[in-house]
Amino acid sequence: AEPFIPRGAHTGETVSQFIRRRLGQEVLDTAMDAFVSGTLASDPDLAEAQSVLPRLTALEQRYGSLTLGMFINKVVKRRHANTADTFSFSGGMEQLALALADTPGITLRTGVQANRILQQHGGWSVRGSIGGQPTQTWTEHLVLGTPADTSSQLLEDTDSTLSRLLAGIEYAPVGVLHLGMKSSNIRQQLDGTGFLVAKHNQLTFNGNLWMSTMFPHRAPPGKALLSSYVGGVRHPDQLQQTDEELTDNILRSLRPLMKITGEPDFVRIRRHAKGLPLYHGQYRARLAQIASHTNALPGLQLCANYIGGVSIRERIFQGRMTAHAIAVQLQRELAARGRQRLLTTSH
Ligand SMILES: Cc1cc2nc3c(=O)[nH]c(=O)nc-3n(C[C@H](O)[C@H](O)[C@H](O)COP(=O)(O)OP(=O)(O)OC[C@H]3O[C@@H](n4cnc5c(N)ncnc54)[C@H](O)[C@@H]3O)c2cc1C
């Protein structure tokens, strides 16, 4: 019946409202709730549908139906598909940064903490410190890839409204508990990617990924790595627990679900107080205001996970888009300077 439901989005429509309207309460409760809390640390009752599910909401706008849109896209995509759905880096996430740093023409300076940026001499002056010593650099084009609260502080002197808009972006705390154990201690067959937790499951974590099945190099032969995601908007207090409490509580939930016996021989916990930005409220309207202020500041670009998606795949895509936008701008500037020189010499 979905294709026959009329279009009906309104500004700021939440994920819950959108999914309930198009696909019904059951899809929301069993699938979308777990996706939004498990992968985005968010809450479908608060997250804006157009910001969190841009492709799905666009299908409704374009085709009037998600089912019809997905069918058409699948047929078209089959002809163009060339990317693997899941990817990882064999040496961990740092491989991505190291590969970028090795790119010819790139000069990387690490350990610099920026604390102020100023519009100066037709470009941007970045002030900060390295090893406690002040440092300063000037550039024509500046990309701020820092989290929203840091960018807000950096831009305080430049545009107080932009700074306020950025400061209003909320973040959720996220923690990850990695448990390594003998595969023989887990009777649940690890033949998938893991599971996400919906509200009605009444568990205190948001999901459990079977890392060693998804990426075999993540655990030695005969061992399995299970990673549980904790916190988010739904369970921020869970991160207040000590390492021992967190491990005990999650293991207690996992034992019956995964038929685990024995103890883990590897435990690692990572806590991120501001783990992921939350696309809550009228988020697109906020981003539109941010864009209009940024566009009035030539040479400045904002490129971080509070714009255009939080996944690494989306970050790589947005990074390329930003680089392309700067390249186009530079070409225009060069062409304009060339024209100017021609005009000057012909006079
Ligand atoms: C626990 C967790 C698990 C995740 N798992 C996945 C996953 O499995 N798959 C996936 O696709 N995504 C995942 N994500 C999301 C993804 O990792 C992030 O959204 C993404 O890395 C953010 O990229 P970014 O460029 O916006 O910010 P970041 O990669 O955080 O980069 C921001 C940079 O700014 C620097 N910085 C901050 N302040 C300053 C300052 N004052 N001066 C100079 N530098 C500064 C920081 O040091 C940092 O290097 C996960 C996120 C979390 C928290």
Image (tube, grey):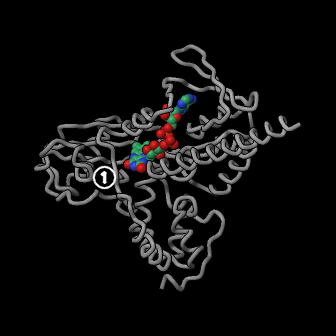
Element type where label 1 sits in the image:
strand
Which quadrant would the C terminus be assigned to in this image? top right
What is the residue that sits farthest to the front in this orientation? 346
Quarter of the image holding residue 133?
A: top right
Left or right: where 33 falls relative to 299: left
The image position of residue 155, as x and y in percent, is 68, 34
Residue 324 image position (x, y, % from top left): 58, 47
- Quarter of the rendering containing residue 298: top right
Per the image, the residue denoted by label 1 is 208
Which is nearer the eye, 212 or 46? 212
Of 294 and 75, the residue lying toward us: 75
Residue type at tag 1: Asn
Q: Quadrant of residue 267?
A: top left
The residue lying toward the viewer, choosing from 338 and 86, is 338
Number of numbered discs overlaid on the protein picture? 1
Residue sitting at 42 percent across and 76 percent down? 75
Q: Residue at x 65, y 52 (%)?
A: 287
Q: Nearer the viewer, residue 5 or 347?
A: 347
Categorize mark 1 by other alpha carbons within 10 Å: few (<14), some (14-19), many (20+).
Answer: many
Asked whether mark 1 and ligand 1 are closer than 8 Å, the reply comes as no
Residue visible at 60% across and 66% down in the picture: 13
Q: Please state the horizontal and vertical placement of residue 9, each as a whole percent of the image.
A: 62, 71
Q: Is residue 154 left or right of residue 104?
A: right
In the displayed image of the protein, which residue is found farthest to the top?
A: 133
Residue 75 visible to the viewer: yes
Left or right: residue 16 compared with residue 158: left
Question: Please, is residue 234 above or below residue 95 in the view?
Answer: below
Q: Residue at x 56, y 38 (%)?
A: 145
| Left or right of residue 9, residue 67 in this image | left
User: Could one spot residue 25 in this view of the protein?
Assistant: no
Q: Position of residue 309 (x, y in %)?
A: 52, 53
